[in-house]
Amino acid sequence: MINAAVIGAGSIGRHHARIFSSLDGVRLAGVVDTNFTQAREIAQKYNCSAFTDHREVLGLADAVSIAVPTTLHFQVAMDFLTHNKNILVEKPITTTVEEADTLIEEAEKRGLVLQVGHLERFNAGVALISTMVDNPKFIESRRTSPFLGRCTDVDVTLDLMIHDIDIILSLVNSTIADIRATGAKVLTENIDVAHAWIEFDNGCIAEAVTSRIANEKVRQLKVFQRNSFLNLDYQKQELTCYSKHDGNVGKEIKKPEEKEPLREQLVSFINCIRNGTRPVVSGYEGREALKVALKISGLVNQGLL
């Protein structure tokens, strides 16, 4: 039996608690939030204990989901790692690359699972398109949303674009040669719109467009490669494939099996603990996505001076 705890009982953490409480071989031992009323509400719903300080569950859990504000990720994660606990920390892994490096080193030294919550990797459509990508030449991602007023304390690159950065890095087996970026601060004091151009050493180019002040919600990934074009619509959960065979171009629409990405992510986390396997998105992948997102933010801010 794996004893699990959730640190942060907000809009994301409450779903971690729901899923942990339903997994075979997992016992939800506690929910932590500085707002005790909120923690107690979730704890009562899933029959576990409520706490206001994450250190109170250090002796109760083998594994924890950390869903607190990004600025607290490093300290909370270090507290659990130094007490030999396996952790899943929401994205972005930390606020700096140096902090991420420290977490990775600590987890490796102790033989612990350090997984980063890049949820889109467990999206059924992304899982499907990943099996069909072969030496891509050009990738285009588009992630836009109407203004909701959430996560405005960070740049849109760290809030939204980092999802696509992680996916792009997972699809392109090459190092980055150059990054160019532009963007704007519109309704907040942080970057609200960003457009990045990423060139890889193997010749692949990726374009990422992100906005949190758009007219409509769009989640789209396009991959162009020799003799085929793949177009994934996340919202429709529909993958359109155009491919060339014997001089003819055919079109096929694939519908991936419907699964809840968060459940798939947490099941994978628990399986990594049980089997001693490497997470799909380890601390290293989380660090690389953070590094690129921070670079893009820096370039945008530099252009706004």
Image (tube, rainbow, N blue to C red):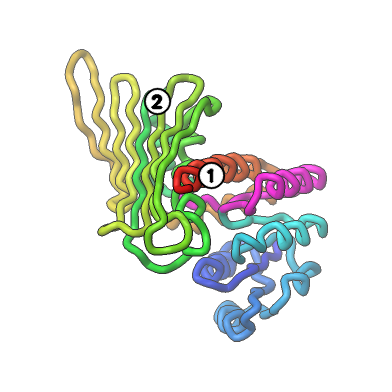
Q: In terms of secondary structure, where does tag 2 sit?
A: loop
| Residue 252 against residue 24 in the figure, above or below | above
Residue 11 placement (x, y as % from top left): 50, 70
Name the quadrant containing residue 251: top left
Relative depth, front residue between 269 and 305: 305
From the image, which quarter does the N terminus lie in?
bottom right
Residue ID for mark 1: 298
For the point 38% across and 67% down, which residue is it?
148
For the point 50% across and 44% down, which residue is it?
302
Frontmost of labels 1 and 2 is 1
For the point 29% across and 38% down, which residue is it?
231
Graded by Cα atoms within 10 Å as few (under 14), some (14 to 19) or many (20 or more), the crowding at tag 1 reads: some
Sequence-wise first label, 1 or 2: 2
Q: Which amino acid does label 2 sit on?
A: Pro
Residue 227 placement (x, y as % from top left): 29, 20
What is the C-alpha distance between the residues marked 1 and 2?
27 Å
Residue 116 placement (x, y as % from top left): 60, 50
Residue 136's disc is: 2
Relative depth, front residue between 260 and 41: 41
Q: Is residue 113 magenta?
A: yes
| Residue 41 against residue 243 in the figure, above or below | below
Relative depth, front residue between 188 and 128: 188
Magenta-tinted stretch: 92-120
Left/right of residue 109 with respect to residue 178 in the rendered view? right
